[in-house]
Amino acid sequence: MMLHIMSTITFDTLKFVERLEKAGIPRDHAKAEAEALADVLSTGTQELSTKGDISALRSEMREMELRINGETKLIRWMVGLSLALSSGILALLVKLFFSLPH
């Protein structure tokens, strides 16, 4: 399961333009700056992770760890059983070999 949530930053361009105008920046210049900053913010934040993204990833990693631990235990059990069966079969073959008349 893969979870990906894109985060966005809300940017009020009108408020930004008004602040720049109050500081003495001409309206056309202020609008151009606001548009440029809005473009940067919209493209620059697409790959940012939120706290929710990180929390979801942690949960996914815990689930994966539990699944891997379970699979590892199963593999260990299967290898142990295989070794025990192989040893038993080998012992029977040796016993059979030495019990046959030569």
Image (tube, rainbow, N blue to C red):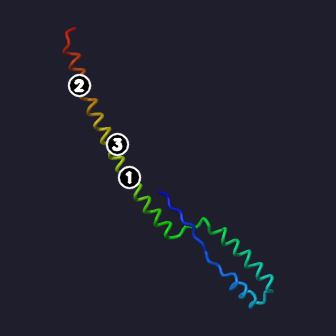
Q: Percent position (x, y) of residue 37?
A: 71, 75
Q: Secondary structure at mark 1?
A: helix
Q: Earlier in the sequence, mark 3 or mark 1?
A: 1
Amino acid type, mark 3? Ile
* Contact, mark 2 vs mark 1 (Cβ under 8 Å): no
Indicate left or right for 61 with 27 as reference: left
Indicate left or right for 94 with 43 as reference: left
Residue under label 2: 91
Q: Earlier in the sequence, mark 2 or mark 1?
A: 1
Q: How many marks?
A: 3
Above or below residue 75? Residue 6 is: below
Above or below residue 80? Residue 36 is: below
Report the Cα–Cα distance between label 2 and label 1: 36 Å
Q: In the image, which disc is placed on residue 3?
A: none
Residue under label 1: 67
Residue under label 3: 75
Amino acid type, mark 1? Arg
Q: Quadrant of residue 92?
A: top left
* Contact, mark 3 vs mark 1 (Cβ under 8 Å): no
Report the Cα–Cα distance between label 2 and label 3: 24 Å
Instruction: Give the camera-side residue of 81 and 27.
Output: 27
Q: Secondary structure at mark 2?
A: helix
Q: Percent position (x, y) of residue 23?
A: 75, 90
**How many residues crowd around disc 2 within 10 Å: few (fewer than 14), some, or many (20 or more)?**
few
Amino acid type, mark 2? Ala
